[in-house]
Amino acid sequence: MFEPIANEGIVAGKGPRPKLRIPYTQLESCCEIIAAIALIAMAAYMAAIWTKLPAQIPGHFNIMGQPDRWDGRNSICLILGIVSALYAGISVLQRFPYIYNHHFGLTPQNVHRLLLGAPASRRHE
């Protein structure tokens, strides 16, 4: 079911790190597609309303719900950039779970248990 990849990479002097190519399940593929569509939709919506936004928008609200900091509308781009970076980073880590820094060295004996359990919501059988 899992296709081994050549043992490449060294883990802090502990020898070669075993790698597996673990295919996405149908649910995981569906979730990836939904997340990508949501990210594209956020960018499209931001582009559609960009000219309608005021030059200054609330950046923070106090406990009473009143704005206590104002930012330029470019701050929305920062939020979209952070969301995009998080999505890309998590997607890469899900695709290559053997690059995680495990407390225990990856060995042929424990590679299935460690890689199938990482991240917590992924690689369950």
Image (tube, rainbow, N blue to C red):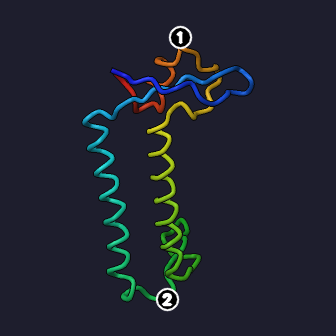
Place residue 14 in its image quadrant: top right
* Residue 57 locus on image (x, y percent): 49, 81
**Residue that extends furthest to the right in the rendered view of this protein:** 13
Quarter of the rendering occupied by the N terminus = top left
Disc 1 marks which residue? Answer: 109
**Residue at 38% of width from left, 88% of height from top?**
51
Left or right position of 6 against 34? right
Q: CA distance from mark 2 to mark 1?
A: 59 Å
Disc 2 marks which residue? Answer: 55
- Please state which of the two labelled residues, at mark 2 or mark 1, is closer to the viewer: 1
Residue type at mark 2 is: Ala
* Residue 64 locus on image (x, y percent): 51, 69
Which of the pair 59/17 is nearer the observer?
17
Secondary structure, mark 1, is loop
Residue type at mark 1 is: Gln
* Residue 71 locus on image (x, y percent): 56, 80
Q: Residues within 10 Å of mark 2 (few under 14, many from 20)?
A: few
Which of the pair 53/81 is nearer the observer?
81
Whether 102 is drawn above or below 94: the answer is above
Whether 32 is drawn above or below 36: the answer is above
